[in-house]
Image (cartoon, rainbow, N blue to C red):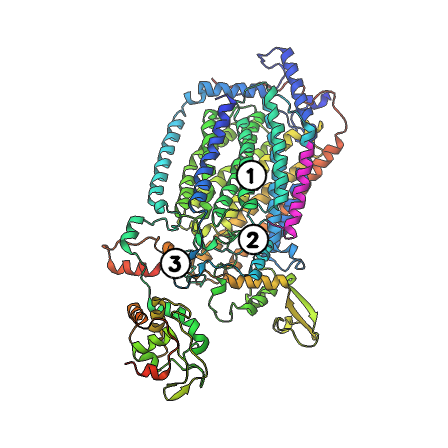
Amino acid sequence: MAFETSSAGVSPVSDDAETRYREDLGAVDTALRLPLTSLLGWSAIWIVIAAALGFLASWKFHAPGLLAEGSWSTYGRLYPAATNALIYGWGFNAAVAVGAWLFSRLAGSAPRGHRFATVAIWFCNFAVLSGVAGILLGESSGVEWFELPPFAATVLLVSFFVLGSWAITTLRGRRFEPIFISQWYVIAGFFWFAWIFTTALIMLDFFPVRGTVQAIIGAWYAQGLFALFFGSIALAAIYYFLPKLSGRPVRYYSLAVVGFWTYGVFNGWLGVQRLVGAPVPAWVQSVGVAMNLLSLAPVAIIGINILATLASSWSAVSNSPAYKFIAFAGLAFVVSSLQLALGGYSDSSHLTNITLLGHSQIFLWLLGFFTTSAFGAIYYLLPRIARGPWASAALINIHFLATALGVILIAVGLLIAGNKQAEGLESAANNFATIISSLNGGAILRTAGYGLFLIGQLAFALNVFRTFLGSFQTLEKPAYVSEPPVMEVAS
Amino acid sequence: MTRIPIILLGIFAVLASSWTGLILSNHLMYGDLGPYVSKDDNKAYPEQLPGIAAHGKQVYQDLGCVYCHTQQVRRPGLASDDKRGWGDRQSVARDYVREERVLLGSDRVGPDLRNIGARKPQGKATYDAAWHYVHLYNPQLTSPGSNMPAYKSLFETRKILGERSPKAIDLPAPYSAPAGYEILPTDRGEALVAYLLSLKDTFNYPEEATKVYVAPKNAEKGHGEAEKKEHK
Amino acid sequence: MSDLNSNPSNAQFEKAGASDESLQRAHASLIRSHAEFNEKSSKLPLFLLGLMSVLIFAASVYMVRHRGGFDPISYDAKFDPRMAVAASAKPTVNPVAEGEKLFATCSACHGPTGKGTPGVFPPLAGSEWATGSEERVIRILLSGLSGPLKVEGATYGAAQMPAFGPGGYGWSDEKISYVLTYVRQAFGNKAGEISPEKVAEIRGKIGQRKAWTEEELLAIP
């Protein structure tokens, strides 16, 4: 349905209340300014670090002779450093920033205690920085996707509790009941992360459980991290920005609630499908596969929401980088989820689970879905925090193209390499020399993808810092003081 | 639908289901699995790692060997693990009960290492300590085309004082140490190789051996017998 | 700054397509009214219901067939505890294969091909002691052998054979029978296999004793 762009839109609320509402939103962004500036600044630094480490690790994978001097530069140390920088550096900062902003915005009230929050953010980031350095120097905890040394992980958890409490204070002065699905996803994402992270820290680092129960916890934690934390925040952003940017409501919105609950339940269980063939009880492996099958339901529902909304709102938005990123994220969600569902149900999953095919799905999810969704949100919210427009549109374009192409190359490269690897491992007649030479092609593609990705992130970081530094001009009123259009719904 | 407490309860229940069903249940069911004491020789399997091998496990962990090597053998018939000499039987949970950090791995860019200490020599690969040292120093010497990095930090080159050290490694011509020098493993290198040589899961736990699929006897007797022989 | 407000949305400053409040109100009314399902595509919820039912059914069937008895130490999804109990209490072993593994201990002295060392360790290949009387060879393994021994015309005696039974390595009847069966059928030997029951019988007869000598053994048929 058409929406009105002039300020003479129909507004059922009186002008007085509207102005107060506008000022409240201004107050929200002002209250969020200090913590979010720190979070966004650190996010920009971390995505560059993560991209650089990922690029280096990917290159060392097929060319181990490069920089062959110290043990810090071997693949076995660079790869976990890269993934931890991506997850606990970039991912954590971006998810908290986007989640807190969305939550406060939709509640219409500002959280309290921004100074505590900012201190926690800086502590956390220094801890993660020393943690990633620790991984390069040999202090890895040994748990995949959770290699941060325990001291760094503990500081991260404590900071998260502070930040979570800070975000929750929004509920006190809220204007609206949380009826919009994005708020549910944010509350859930934060709660679930606290739980899975605490479990992993206690049952794997501090009081390690015995035997392969560690593998079960590790698999549960990994899927919880990807889907229940990062996925929730990314979906919150997608569900908010698709209608917000286009002015058209989410299609089949009444299904979204069912999608939310089924998404949460099944993703908690299907992590263990990555353990088919491993020395964990057979019923655990089967439960993972069965739940993976059931997870087609939330994928279908959320996929329908996203794809139908994209189809209906495509023409309404033009020249919007945020929308492009959100659209890319939505498509990546569908592809990556189907990749996981179909891969888990295959007959040879005991073989494909230990190839790069798993990595292809995970990195498409982390980089193609979560990261691009966060970028979309950041392109919208950062000018409102910094009180000034983005410094350069050219850098935004470079960022989008380089990120999109880079992610596609990474995912496709890993898919090709993983397929060749699975084919090779199937028969005992293939020795490893032939397997490696067949998968190196895909590995080189991945490196090329990371190179592009790194260029994009350098453009992004440059833009972020230029925008913050250039925004010393303060606006008298928040930039959006003019009334945005009212969303109309077809009846 | 709009009340926060109900939503929070739901969010709690959602994760509680998998936490209870997967983690708590398995921890209760087999989290206290202990070693099996064999009546034949009164030894407890899996065996305790000797000290230097335990130190080597730390080296294995911090160098990140787990990102290319798995330590989980598939059962014969399921995959080609037994044909590659990676193990006669599948890995079971009891094999890992003594390990503080279980490094199952999730990617096979290199062979599975669970039974590398028991692996039979194959051609030039003898899988003894000397072979491991050369392989770690420069993987291309023993496995051309491999993507494995050269772990030169596990070795040191030093001047020969008097006699050549018995620990010095022998490398083929273009790579050998310059005249008057020898290449030795450092403590970390020795520990890592000791750990690798200690990796052998050769004991057959009787209880686990019976818990495999057995084809029904009435169908084909010959088949049933053959199946039983496979699953030792 | 008014120019930001008057310009249309541009890449450097995204403008909202709708206000937050109207967004929330619009979606709340969508949920209440199910407006979109009054259109032609109202088959969607039915389709999704059907999909969920099919998925639940398929997942349940999968779980029933691949539950591995819910046994915490079963790693085979097709394992069925009822069949396994009926099938075998003890998995059948191949004595020669087991004996080959155990022979690694013997090869330390007798050599990997059973040739021994002249004057020190007697050979097993073609040895009349190894392929001959069961009674003698089982006794040698259970309690060991000391003193000189004549094998195929040559004398050996520089080393003592340790006991593998009680008082020595403590090998079980099964292990001794497997390694003896292997030795009697390897290295070109062609003799009969030895059963664990025979080993147990002899063990019961002799108990724990010191190592045998050649004369004592020759006295036994």
- Residue A338 seen from this side: no
Residue A124 within the magenta-colored segment of the rendering: yes
The amino acid type, in three-letter code, at marker 1 is Thr
- Residue A72 seen from this side: yes
For disc 1, the neighbor class at 10 Å (few under 14, some 14 to 19, many from 20) is some
Instruction: Give the chain of mark 1.
Output: A
Label for residue A216? none
Comparing A387 with A11, the one in front is A387
- The residue at which mark 2 appears reads as A443
Q: Are marks 2 and 1 in contact (CB under 8 Å)?
A: no
Residue at position x 39%, y 61% from top?
B39
The amino acid type, in three-letter code, at marker 3 is Pro
- The residue at which mark 1 appears reads as A198
Locate residue B231: give its quadrant.
Answer: bottom left
Report helix, strand or loop for mark 1: helix
Q: Give the alpha-carbon distance from disc 2 to disc 1, as whole Å.
A: 35 Å
The magenta stretch is A118-140
For disc 2, the neighbor class at 10 Å (few under 14, some 14 to 19, many from 20) is many
Label for residue B76? 3
Report helix, strand or loop for mark 3: loop
The majority secondary structure of the magenta stretch comes to helix
Residue B166, position as x, y percentages in the image: 62, 73
Residue C100, position as x, y percentages in the image: 38, 70
Q: Give the alpha-carbon distance from disc 3 to disc 2, as whole Å.
A: 30 Å
Instruction: Give the chain of mark 3.
Output: B
Mark 2 against mark 1, which lies toward the viewer? 1
Q: Is residue A67 above or below residue C139?
A: above
